[in-house]
Image (spheres, helix red, strand yellow):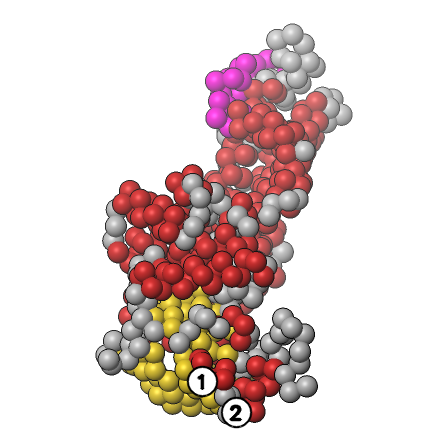
């Protein structure tokens, strides 16, 4: 099967105060339709910037020069106009962010925020959009969705807000869902629920999932393949079982060793 | 606090809306009974050509307050647009808008007002335009500041990540979050504008007679203030009351909007 996403020699160069810094140094990878791929690495290794490159979102207040090629459904995303890109964002590729507490507009009801995206991308009527919004809220596991749709973000807990954000992200049935540390800001018990939800939605909606995390514990059982990133490069890539069983790169071994184990034994010790 | 301010504002609005219909006498009608003290017919007495003082205060208040409200509304509209564009777009646009506003800001309010009114003539329209121009920079700055911070919040990037356009982000996801400082500043600007309007009218740069307004009433009454102190005290108290209304309202709004709004 031809890949859904085909990234070749992607580079990202930031210029802050006139000093250029290359954060992503020519990485290449594929994601097949419906496939789930993990990106693991420490803070600042370039994994979030890679995700933002696919969305073509430059962090506010900085300018970034993208290089290479991001093939998606026969187009190079890096050459699209901003207008064409806006039709891709949310419709074909959507993203779930790290901090659910801050990622919703605090002065709009959650239902209105989902309606908005549906109407933007699908041209549904106000009534039909609200109907779909309620379905989506139910789909992500929010009880009494018809009533909760009129509530504001501060009336939801962190885990519930992340569910709302996931509902927004999957509202237009995108081909690719990018989840950037989707559970980092949540309680451990809630983390597992959110991961299960992402996995279920991926299968039900036939989306590809790009899961970004610093925690090998999060991707175990979630993804089929893993790319380990370090210093702006992919240092190791492969099926998850193989990577867990026989990591070849010293950095991967170090990352795996950093995962706490239940029996208290220290790897290599 | 906000309730007191709202009650005071309601009284002012009543004067603006009802105006002549609640005044006991025709405000322009003269009589032989000049500079009379308060009695049962003329509650606050009469002025130097025998016009009823209370009626003139009410009708004059309508003029003064209407100019104030319209001028501040215009300044607010301009300030919102300029501040939002400046803060949200940033870069060179921000630089140009803010430097232009700095030029206006650098002029003393009265000097600018006197210059404009002197050049274009003392009409109500010119007075309103002048005051709107004078207060636009203050409001634009109050809008721009919080916009600079809110546009970097996560929910703005989240909105962008689902394909929301920049105009809609600015209006729907940024503007509603910066509204509380704007409300407070608008109220304070109203208080300042009352003084500016009456002071310019006092100097003869306001709307020409026979339309009464608090500023010109003060100016006319000044020469008789020892004979009939109420002719000066009346408009003075009205000016202070109106100004106080907006200050009380601003403080009240600040309390309501700042505490536990999130």
Residue at image location 41% in from the left, 82% down from the top: A239
Residue B210, image x, y percentages:
50, 29
> On what subunit does the disc labeled 1 rest?
A
Per the image, label 2 sits on a secondary structure element best described as loop
Label for residue A242?
1
The answer to whether residue B109 of the structure is visible from this angle is yes
Considering depth in this image, is A198 or A74 the residue closer to the camera?
Answer: A198
Label for residue A249?
2
Q: Earlier in the sequence, mark 2 or mark 1?
A: 1
**Residue at the front extreme?**
A263
Was residue B143 drawn as part of the magenta stretch in this picture? Answer: no
Was residue B30 drawn as part of the magenta stretch in this picture? Answer: yes
Considering depth in this image, is A195 or B231 the residue closer to the camera?
Answer: A195
Instruction: Name the quadrant containing residue A250.
Output: bottom right
Q: Magenta segment range?
A: B15-34
Residue B200, image x, y percentages:
59, 43
Label for residue A123?
none
> On what subunit does the disc labeled 2 rest?
A
Residue at image location 25% in from the left, 53% down from the top: A123
Location of the N terminus of chain A by quadrant is bottom left
Considering depth in this image, is B156 or A206 the residue closer to the camera?
Answer: A206
Location of the C terminus of chain A by quadrant is bottom right
Magenta: main secondary structure equals loop
Q: How many marks?
A: 2
Q: What separation in Å lies between label 2 and label 1 (alpha carbons)?
A: 12 Å
Q: Does A233 sit left or right of A5 as displayed?
A: right
The answer to whether residue B119 of the structure is visible from this angle is no
Residue at image location 53% in from the left, 76% down from the top: A216
Considering depth in this image, is B162 or B200 the residue closer to the camera?
Answer: B162
Residue at image location 73% in from the left, 24% down from the top: B229
């Amino acid at each position: 099967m031809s890949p859904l996403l085909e990234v070749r020699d992607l580079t990202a160069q930031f210029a802050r105060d006139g000093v250029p810094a290359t954060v992503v140094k020519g990485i290449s990878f594929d994601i097949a339709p419906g496939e789930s791929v993990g990106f693991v690495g420490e803070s600042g290794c370039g994994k979030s910037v890679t995700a933002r490159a696919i969305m073509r979102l430059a962090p506010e207040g900085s300018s970034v020069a993208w290089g290479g090629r991001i093939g998606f459904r026969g187009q190079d995303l890096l050459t699209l106009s901003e207008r064409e890109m806006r039709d891709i964002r949310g419709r074909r590729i959507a993203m779930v962010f790290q901090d659910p507490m801050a990622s919703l507009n605090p002065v709009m009801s959650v239902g209105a925020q989902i309606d908005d995206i549906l109407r933007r991308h699908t041209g549904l009527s106000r009534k039909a959009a609200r109907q779909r919004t309620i379905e989506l809220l139910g789909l992500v596991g929010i009880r009494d969705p018809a009533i909760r749709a009129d509530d504001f973000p501060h009336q939801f807990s962190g885990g519930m807000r992340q569910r709302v954000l996931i509902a927004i992200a999957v509202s237009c049935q995108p081909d690719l869902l990018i989840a950037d540390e989707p559970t980092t800001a949540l309680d451990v018990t809630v983390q597992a629920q959110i991961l299960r939800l992402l996995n279920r939605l991926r299968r039900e909606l036939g989306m590809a999932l790009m899961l970004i995390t610093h925690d090998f514990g999060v991707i175990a059982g979630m993804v089929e393949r893993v790319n380990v990133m370090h210093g702006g490069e992919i240092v190791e890539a492969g099926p998850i079982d193989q990577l867990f069983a026989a990591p070849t790169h010293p950095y991967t071994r170090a990352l795996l060793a950093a995962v706490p184990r239940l029996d208290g034994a220290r790897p290599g010790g | 606090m906000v309730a007191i301010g709202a009650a005071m504002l309601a009284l002012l609005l009543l004067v603006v809306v009802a105006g002549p219909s609640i005044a006991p006498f025709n405000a322009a009608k003269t009589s032989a009974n000049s500079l009379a003290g308060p009695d049962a017919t003329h509650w606050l007495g009469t002025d130097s050509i025998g016009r009823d003082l209370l009626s003139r205060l009410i009708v004059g208040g309508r003029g003064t307050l209407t100019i104030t409200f319209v001028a501040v509304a215009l300044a607010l509209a301009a300030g919102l647009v300029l501040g939002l564009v400046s803060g949200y777009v940033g870069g060179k646009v921000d630089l140009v808008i803010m430097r232009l506003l700095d030029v206006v800001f650098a002029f003393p309010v009265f000097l600018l007002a006197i210059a404009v009114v002197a050049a274009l003539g003392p009409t109500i329209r010119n007075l309103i335009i002048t005051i709107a121009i004078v207060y636009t920079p203050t409001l634009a700055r109050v809008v721009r500041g919080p916009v600079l911070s809110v546009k970097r919040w996560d929910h703005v990037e989240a909105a962008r990540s689902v394909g929301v356009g920049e105009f809609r982000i600015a209006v729907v996801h940024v503007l509603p979050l910066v509204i509380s400082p704007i409300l407070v500043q608008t109220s304070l600007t109203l208080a300042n504008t009352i003084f500016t309007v009456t002071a310019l009218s006092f100097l003869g740069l306001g709307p020409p007679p026979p339309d009464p307004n608090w500023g010109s009433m003060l100016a006319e009454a000044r020469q008789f203030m020892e004979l009939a102190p109420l002719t000066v005290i009346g408009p003075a108290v009205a000016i202070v009351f109106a100004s106080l209304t907006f200050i009380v309202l601003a403080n009240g709004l600040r309390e309501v909007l700042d505490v536990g709004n999130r």
